[in-house]
Image: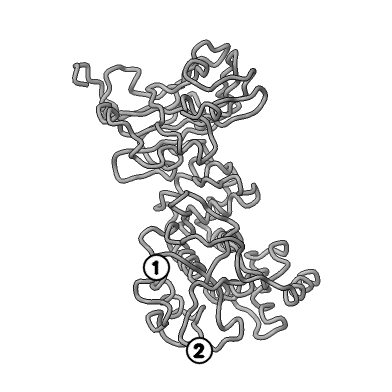
């Protein structure tokens, strides 16, 4: 505790800037249907007198405000309050110290009263139960980031027995398994925590550009919404949350097939997609199958990976409707070229059967992977010895014309080894031999 006390004292004297550099983006994108804009700290924690009442009494939180319901609930629970002038200041950033107090009070963790600095009892309470780690902060007066909130709430959620298996399983993810265009910003140590926060619905990402924005400063309104989402997750059965089921299955097997469809991995795969075993040697490249994402197009389930490969369904060609598609499949390959070449249909011989190329360059350029026949010829070029993520597409249908189309295969023409393999079995496929398909 001596080291931690020194960190606390350092936090008292450090100067924390309360505004994040650069323009703030609308939070409405993260919580569709809400008029997002803000999120931050606690008035009482900074010495301000508390204002009583609900969010509809705050002059700056009108009934139509995107966070009005969460603010009202949080005020009723007593872990956040307003200011003496009748405002809540939803756009004001929250410091790390302020958020710690909010979280301790929301969880009703026991803590001592008083102390110097004022936030020491709250930091000690979180440290005691493992929600806060000594390495997390050195300056407690700085604004808290979204990533820092995710760390705290995910550690807290993982203390629940029914969530423990998820946080453990998520060590099997790689950062590209999270469907955000800025996924490369997620460090390995943070990946399970970010995955749990996203999977449990505590954060959602921003719809306009599919980012997670880890470094963005949190405001009072945003902090309250995330805490309320976290508290709701604590009393929710994770087995009923599709996001969590997809992420857990991908972490354990390399595919989300069972979570979103009736498709089954072929028995010969040993229950998982193993990039060390599903390897193709071709004269121009080595390819390892790393992931197999299923994107259902019918039914009530929508995969978290749909935007990563489709962006939106307007990219779907009209003739696809004639194929009785139940859904699409995106195979992610790690490809190491043996020579420089242009990634097109004549040079890259690995494909899925039935084959369904993803249309539109936008998803590939947004997420940074490559696919065949992109319009940008420079983007298609690959260099000898480098590793590229290459995506190939396929589909599965309810009605098929040929026996081979009932299941999904990976094939490579002109391969040295690893010519082909069945990946997924489709028990719902019906063979129809007439010309109408």
Image disc number at residue 390:
none
Quadrant of the image for the C terminus? Answer: top left
Colour mapping used in the image: one colour
Alpha carbon distance from label 1 to label 2: 23 Å
Return the x and y of residue 330 as percentages of the image width and height. Answer: 44, 32
Is residue 109 toward the left or the right of residue 374 in the image? Answer: right
Residue that carries the numbered disc 1 in the rendered image: 66
Identify the residue at horizontal 58%, vertical 64% (top origin).
Answer: 217
Asked whether disc 1 touches disc 2, contact meaning CB atoms under 8 Å apart, the reply is no
User: Where, by quadrant of the figure, is residue 400 drawn?
Assistant: top left
Residue 348: x, y in percent?
52, 19
- Which image quarter holds the N terminus? bottom right
Q: Where 229 sits versus 171, above or below?
A: below
The residue indicated by pointer 2 is 84
Q: Is residue 210 left or right of residue 10?
A: left
Q: Position of residue 291 (x, y in %)?
A: 51, 33
In this picture, is 194 found above or below 230? Answer: above
Q: Residue at 40% of width from left, 38% of height from top?
A: 310
Secondary structure state at the residue bearing disc 1: loop
Q: Is residue 158 above or below residue 256?
A: below
Front residue (pair 366, 189)? 366
How crowded is the residue under tag 1: few (<14 C-alpha within 10 Å), some, or many (20+)?
many
How busy is the neighbourhood of tag 2: few (under 14 within 10 Å), some, or many (20 plus)?
few
98 sits left or right of 135 in the view: left
Please identify the quarter of the rendering in which residue 261 is found: top left
Find residue 416 and report its horizontal and vertical position in percent.
58, 11
Residue 314's quadrant in the figure? top left
């Amino acid at each position: 505790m001596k080291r931690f006390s020194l960190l606390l004292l350092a936090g008292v004297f450090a100067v924390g800037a309360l505004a994040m550099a650069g323009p703030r983006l609308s939070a409405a994108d993260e919580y569709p249907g809400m008029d997002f804009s803000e999120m931050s700290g606690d008035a009482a924690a900074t010495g301000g007198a508390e204002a009583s009442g609900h969010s509809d009494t705050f002059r700056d939180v009108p009934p139509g405000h995107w966070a009005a319901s969460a603010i009202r609930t949080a005020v009723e629970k007593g872990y956040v309050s307003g200011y003496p002038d009748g405002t809540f200041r939803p756009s004001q950033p929250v410091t790390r110290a302020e958020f710690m107090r909010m979280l301790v009070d929301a969880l009703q963790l026991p803590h001592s009263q008083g102390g110097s600095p004022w936030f020491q009892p709250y930091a000690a309470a979180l440290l005691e139960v493992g929600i806060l780690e000594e390495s997390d902060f050195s300056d407690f007066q700085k604004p808290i980031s979204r990533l820092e909130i995710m760390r705290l709430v995910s550690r807290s959620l993982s203390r629940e027995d029914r969530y423990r298996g998820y946080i453990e399983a998520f060590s099997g993810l790689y950062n590209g398994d999270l469907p955000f265009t800025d996924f490369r910003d997620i460090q390995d140590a943070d990946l399970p925590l970010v995955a749990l926060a996203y999977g449990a619905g505590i954060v959602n990402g921003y719809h306009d550009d599919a980012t997670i924005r880890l470094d963005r400063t949190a405001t009072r309104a945003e902090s309250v919404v995330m805490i309320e989402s976290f508290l709701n997750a604590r009393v929710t059965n994770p087995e009923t949350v599709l996001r969590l089921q997809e992420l857990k299955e991908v972490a354990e097997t390399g595919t989300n097939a069972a979570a979103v469809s009736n498709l089954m991995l072929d028995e010969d795969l040993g229950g998982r997609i193993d990039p060390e075993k599903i390897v193709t040697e071709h004269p121009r490249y080595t390819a390892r199958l790393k992931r197999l994402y299923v994107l259902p197009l019918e039914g009530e389930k929508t995969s978290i990976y749909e935007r990563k490969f489709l962006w939106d369904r307007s990219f779907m060609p009209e003739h696809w409707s004639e194929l009785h598609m139940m859904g699409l499949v995106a195979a992610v390959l790690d490809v190491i070229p043996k020579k420089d070449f242009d990634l097109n249909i004549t040079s890259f011989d690995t494909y899925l059967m039935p084959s369904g190329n993803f249309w539109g360059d936008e998803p590939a350029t947004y997420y940074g992977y490559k696919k065949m026949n992109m319009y940008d010829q420079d983007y298609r070029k690959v260099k000898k010895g480098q590793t590229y993520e290459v995506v190939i597409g396929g589909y599965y249908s309810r009605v098929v014309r040929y026996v081979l189309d009932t299941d999904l295969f990976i094939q490579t023409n002109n391969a040295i080894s690893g010519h082909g393999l069945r990946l997924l079995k489709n028990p719902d496929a019906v063979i129809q031999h007439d010309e109408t398909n």
